[in-house]
Image (spheres, rainbow, N blue to C red):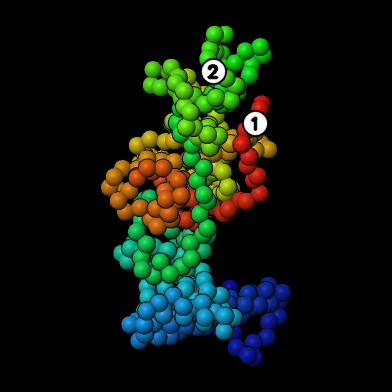
Amino acid sequence: MPSRALTSTTVVQTYAELKRAVLAVALKGRRNADRAWLLTYHEIGRLISEHLLLNQDRADYGTQVIPRLAGDTGISVRSLYECRQFYRYFPILRTSAELGWSHYVLLCQVEDKGQRQVLMTQAMKNDWSSPELRERVRALNAIDVTPERADAAKDVTPPKPLTPKRGTVGVCRVVASGGGLAVDLGFTSYVDLPAATKRREGDFVRFEADGEFEAAPDASKSDLYTYRAEMLRVVDGDTLWMKIYLRPDLWVKEKLRLRGLDCPEIATPEGKAAKRFVETLVAGAKSVTITTFKPDKWDRYLSDVFLAVPSDLSAKASATAEASAKEGAGSDGEMFLNTHLLAHGHARRMDEYALTDWDGE
């Protein structure tokens, strides 16, 4: 049956006609509401942007006005920043386009203007839903693993980064083993020491490149359980199969869970995007270092993972990556993967893990 326009005098006879009429009115209402909200957000963004432009000579005014405005209006700081960025990226709003506010928020995460325009055109042409657009935005952002933040993005409060727990590769501890002593390599692996050894229980030692070990009197518990590793397979955004070198001539294969965060389920578009993000980062890394902790309830070792990235990428590392490096993530050019996932929106923090030093078995 050909569709016809509904008027205030339309009378429907059959249930099928009633269903179609109700859906048509509801759809029209939602679209009108979406357009009204888009105009509202756009106008808020314009007011904020032009006000800040007028007051750009006032020191620190820009960082103070939005939190103050949020407190006085009841609109969240995040929403006000999003409105401002929305206006800056889309000063001329196409209200006829079938894109909602959630679409524009996602598009604002694409800093390159050309890429943003291409995605917007594709979203309208293919009638992408918000989850469909989100998957493509995250996949696109995964290509540039250390993006520079645009000025607008600097105003947004980043997620709280994890404090990296990075030890020192090669440091182990001497433990009691039956009637003698052994070096605890981690992952329930040990090397027996000769009966005539001068080492004592609790001593720290360091394995050298030839596999022999020397005393490490300056080491501590925080240096333990840190290894060179090779990525075998990315299971999902927060779960990895690793080849872990306990010493130069000995390795184990283990399934690790990234400490302190949780990525979306792999069956979801967001989960697939998180996995691609990690795969892209690992592919560009020159080496991998991990520090491990006690297993979780699924018997996966928790881990902090550090990627040595090429110098051309480390030179333009993101603010979050630089901050994590200052907190102990490692040398220049080393990226703390856990925090990088959080900073790029591919994971949320999981603070219920209570990590302690390993004392005993």
Against 112, is 273 above or below? above
Give SS at disc 2: loop
Q: In which quadrant of the rendered image does the N terminus lie? A: bottom right
What amino acid does circle 1 point to? Asp
Pinpoint residue 82: horizontal percent, then vertical percent: 47, 72
What amino acid does circle 2 point to? Arg
User: Would you identify the image quadrant in which residue 320 lies?
Assistant: bottom left
What is the spatial separation of the Cα atoms under label 2 and label 1, in whole angstroms? 18 Å
Give SS at disc 1: loop
Q: Residue 199 carries which label?
A: 2
Q: Which residue is drawn at 52% across and 71% down?
A: 78
Residue closest to the eye, 210 or 265: 210
Image label count: 2
Residue closest to the eye, 28 or 184: 184
Q: Is residue 191 left or right of residue 332?
A: right
Q: Residue 359 carries which label?
A: 1
